Amino acid sequence: MAELNTIRSTSGVSAAQIDEGLRSHMNKVYGTMSVGMLITALAAWAISGLSITATPTEYQIGADRYLTQLGYTLYVSPLKWVLMFAPLAFIFFGWGTLMRRGSAATVQLGFFAFAAVIGISMGTVFMIYTPYSIAQTFLVTAIAFAGLSLWGYTTKKNLSGMGTFLMMGVIGLIIAMVINIFLQSPAMMFAISALGILIFAGLTAYYTQDIKNTYVAHAAHGDQDWLDKAAYDGALSLYISFLNMFQFLLMFMGQQE
C-alpha cells in the first residue's frame, strides 16, 4: 500500500482522481464479467435444449433422453476436442495478441465471443445435472467468489507470491486433467476437483488485488490506451476463476438427472 501511495504522490494525477477511477474501473470489471457469465449460461442452456430430445434416436443418454444430431456432433464426434481445447488455445495464444493490437471494442467483442464458446462447450452441464443443483451450486460459488474477491481488494497483504504459486498449480491441474481423460479415474477426478476449488479460490483473491494494483500504476502514468482495455482483461481473469470454481463445486454438489 505504501508503494501505491508513493505512485500517487509522485504522479500528476491526484489520489482522489485515481480512487474515483479505480471504483469505476472495478465496477466495469465486475459488470463485464457478469455479462460474460450471462452469455455463457444462456448459450449453455440454449445449446443443451437443441442437443437432447425425447424422440428416440441412435444416441441414447438416459431414460427417454437422446442426443440430436447436433448434440452428437458437438459432444461425441471429434469436434468435442475442438470445443475442449479451443478456449485454452485462445487464452494462451490469442488473448495477449488481442490485448496488444486490438481496440477496446475488439477486445470486448473477443471476450463475449469467448464466453459464448465456453457456453456451448458447457451445454452438457444442463444435460447431466438437475436445474436445482445447478442453481444451488451457482449460488454457493457466487457467495464464495464475492467474499474472496472482497478480501483480495481490501487486504494489505501482498498476494503476488501466492499468485505465482497458484499459476504453477493451474498448469499442473491442466496436465492432470488431460491425463485423466484417458485414465478415467474417479479418485483422480476427486483430487483434481478438490485442488481446483482451492486453486481458483486463491486466484480469485489474487486477481482482484492484481487488477486493483495494476490499475493504480497505469492510471498514475496516464496510460489511457491500456486503461480502455484493462477492464476486459480483468473481467476475463475473474470470469475464469468463477467458472472453474463453479465447475469443480458442481462435481461435489451436483445431482445428476
Image (cartoon, rainbow, N blue to C red):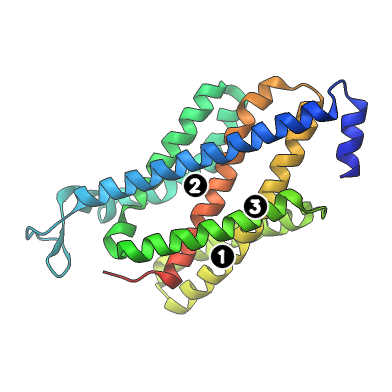
Which label belongs to residue 124? none
Q: Give the mark nearest the N terminus, 3 or 1.
A: 3
Q: Which residue is mark 1?
A: 197
Q: Residue 241, how many percent across, how many down?
A: 56, 53
Q: Which amino acid lies under the numbered mark 3 shown in the image of this protein?
A: Ser
Q: Is residue 8 above or below residue 248?
A: above
Q: Residues within 10 Å of mark 3 (few under 14, many from 20)?
A: many
Q: How far apart in space, not on screen, are marks 3 and 1 (Cα)?
A: 15 Å
Q: Residue 179, how many percent across, how many down?
A: 47, 66
Q: Residue at x 77, y 51 (%)?
A: 160
Left or right of 162 on screen, residue 67: left
Q: Quadrant of residue 14?
A: top right
Where disc 3 sits, the SS reads helix
| Whether residue 246 can be seen here | yes
Q: Which residue is mark 2?
A: 88
Foreground label between 3 and 1: 3
Q: Give the mark nearest the N terminus, 2 or 1.
A: 2
Give whichever of 120, 138 is nearer the camera: 138
Left or right of 213 on screen, residue 42: left
Q: Which residue is mark 3?
A: 149
